[in-house]
Image (cartoon, grey):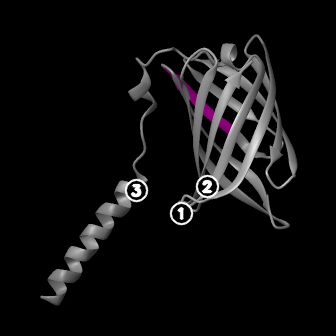
Amino acid sequence: MKRCLLLTSLLIATTLGLGGCASQSIETYANEKPTLDLATYFNGTLDAYGVFTDRSGSVVKRFTVVMVCNWEGDKGTLDEDFSYSDGSKQKRVWHLTKLGNGRFTGRADDVVGEASGESRGNTFHWNYTLSLPVDGKVYEVQFDDWMYLMGDKVMLNKASMGKFGIRLGEVTLSFFKR
């Protein structure tokens, strides 16, 4: 009886664990409108408002971002200036390359290696590893980043952050194109 209970518990735990690893597919959004053209949306000046929440969903930090973006052919630059609720500031400059077929790569000084992404319908999804300074130490954390175009001027962004497969928190942003 104990063995049966133990095996059942193990099976349930394994099923729940594997279910937590499942992720959505970019193809799900292929027919969603309005169609996102990354080079068109991220061109000009945008304002963003966001929060970082921990695993429990509690807001750890609020922030705003002013982004100055431009494209020349298949190369884009997203110059981001962050202002955090604790008074700290940060700058990140993304250098994006459009590869065709809705695929993109990106680099920034605090990104480890290269980000890779794909766009379908109204959605852009990309993954990257970020060097994140916390309390005097730097941690490499993985981002699973999803952006959804809502209209000509508004995009919503939800990014899950983790390390070693463990979810650490989420970043939620709203972009407003001026």
Q: Which residue is mark 2?
A: 53
Tell me the residue that label 3 is attached to: 20
Are the residues at dot 2 and dot 1 in contact (C-beta closer than 8 Å)? yes
In the depicted structure, whether residue 104 falls above or below residue 152: below
Q: Secondary structure at mark 2?
A: strand
Residue stretch rendered in magenta on the structure: 115-120
Badge count: 3
Q: Quadrant of the N terminus?
A: bottom left
Image check: 53 left or right of 20?
A: right
Q: Position of residue 35 (x, y in %)?
A: 52, 14
Q: Residue at x 63, y 34 (%)?
A: 116
Cα gap from disc 2 to disc 1, whole angstroms: 8 Å
Distance from Cα at disc 2 to Cα at disc 3 = 18 Å
Specify few, some or many for label 3: CA neighbours under 10 Å numbering under 14, 14-19, or 20 or more.
few
Q: Give SS at disc 1.
A: loop
Q: Does the stretch in magenta take in 117?
A: yes
Query: What amino acid is at disc 1?
Result: Ser
Left or right side of 94 for 145: left
Q: Tell me the quarter of the picture where residue 149 sits.
A: top right
Q: Which mark is residue 56?
A: 1
In the picture, measured across the screen, residue 110 lies left or right of residue 123, that is right
Which residue is painted at 76% across and 18% down in the image? 75
Residue at the outermost left position: 1
Of pointers 1 and 3, the one earlier in the residue sequence: 3
For this orientation, the residue located farthest to the bottom is 2
Residue 165 position in % (x across, y down): 53, 60
Q: Give the quadrant of the C terminus.
A: top right
